[in-house]
Image (tube, grey):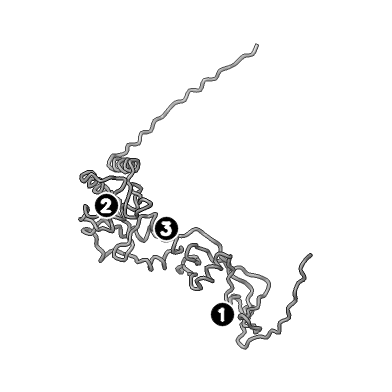
């Protein structure tokens, strides 16, 4: 059986500060904006009321970011008027005829490349921070239209590193140099490549900062940390072979040869007697 609808009678009244959005041409209430959210966003708001962040420069489309996702803001207008009442109150404070909707989109992290490529880190000796444009984590958060987790993931995929409080891209040549020194040290000291100690690598490569040595091991597919010890890395022969191949290809000029092949088509006629 269908449940009977319950009719609730409310004694409503209009507040002295009541604002009627229909009285203005823009149809936007400066006091209230209604936002429709799904269950995932609602749970995040309930756990962290200040967790939603609106991002966007003047020439950009505004987005809303949670801690893990990015949404674009869309204004939906309605022919029905909605009355706004505070919780546990019967006094109407405003009326609106539209609301904002969130549509999940891909994180807009492409700008990270533009920002960080201006100050690629090539080593302490050649690094000139006085003229370089550098960004802290908070500055990247404010500029890039993506959630914190999405920005962190993009920084990892870009193989970026935080140096002296600023996020930088590391020169591929520097990464290759450090990995080459690690492999050379392992051969000299007869280290087991399947259980390579981070501390030993840092001691052998005193010319490079310890956090940079760890970074080059962590981001490169040549070395993967073992599951039982976070400071022990395993260098597989397959990944070392890939690393060596990349070195050879980077140093060898690439010649492109274009071959023109003439195809001869032979038609065979089959006669049935």
Quadrant that contains the N terminus:
bottom right
Q: Residue at 52%, 68% (x, y): give it.
A: 44
Tell me the quarter of the picture where residue 118 sits. Answer: bottom left
Question: Of callouts 2 and 1, which one flags the residue occurring earlier in the amino acid sequence?
Answer: 1
The span from disc 2 to disc 1 (Cα, nearest Å) is: 54 Å
Picture disc at residue 153: 3
Rendered view: 199 above or below 264: below
The span from disc 2 to disc 3 (Cα, nearest Å) is: 22 Å
> Can you identify the residue that label 2 sits on?
174
**Residue at the extreme right:** 1
The answer to whether the residue labelled 2 contacts the one labelled 1, judged by CB atoms less than 8 Å apart, is no
Q: Residue at 51%, 73% (x, y): give it.
A: 49
> Can you identify the residue that label 1 sits on?
31
Left or right, residue 181 beside residue 24? left
Left or right, residue 187 beside residue 64? left
Rendered view: 233 above or below 88: above
């Amino acid at each position: 059986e269908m449940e009977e609808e319950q009719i609730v009678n409310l004694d409503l009244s209009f507040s002295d500060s009541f604002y009627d959005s229909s009285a203005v041409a823009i149809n936007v209430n400066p006091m209230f904006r209604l936002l429709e959210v799904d269950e995932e966003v609602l749970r995040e708001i309930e756990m962290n009321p200040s967790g939603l962040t609106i991002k966007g420069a003047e020439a950009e489309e505004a987005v809303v970011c949670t801690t893990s996702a990015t949404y674009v803001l869309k204004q939906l207008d309605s022919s029905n008027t909605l009355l706004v009442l505070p919780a546990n109150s019967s006094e109407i404070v405003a009326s609106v005829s539209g609301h904002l909707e969130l549509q999940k989109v891909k994180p807009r992290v492409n700008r990270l490349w533009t920002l960080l490529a201006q100050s690629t880190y090539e080593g302490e000796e050649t690094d000139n921070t006085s003229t370089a444009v550098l960004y802290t984590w908070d500055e990247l958060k404010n500029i890039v239209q993506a959630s914190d987790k999405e920005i962190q993931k993009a920084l990892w995929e870009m193989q970026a590193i935080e140096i002296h409080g600023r996020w930088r891209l590391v020169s591929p040549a520097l990464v290759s140099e450090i990995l080459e020194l690690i492999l050379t040290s392992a051969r000299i000291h007869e280290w087991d490549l399947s259980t390579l100690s981070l501390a030993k690598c840092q001691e052998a490569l005193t010319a490079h900062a310890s956090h940079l040595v760890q970074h080059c091991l962590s981001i490169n597919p040549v070395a993967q940390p073992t599951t039982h010890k976070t400071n022990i890395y395993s260098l597989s022969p397959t990944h070392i072979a890939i690393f060596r191949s990349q070195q050879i290809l980077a140093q060898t000029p690439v010649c492109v040869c274009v071959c023109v092949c003439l195809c001869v088509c032979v038609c065979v006629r089959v006669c049935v007697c």
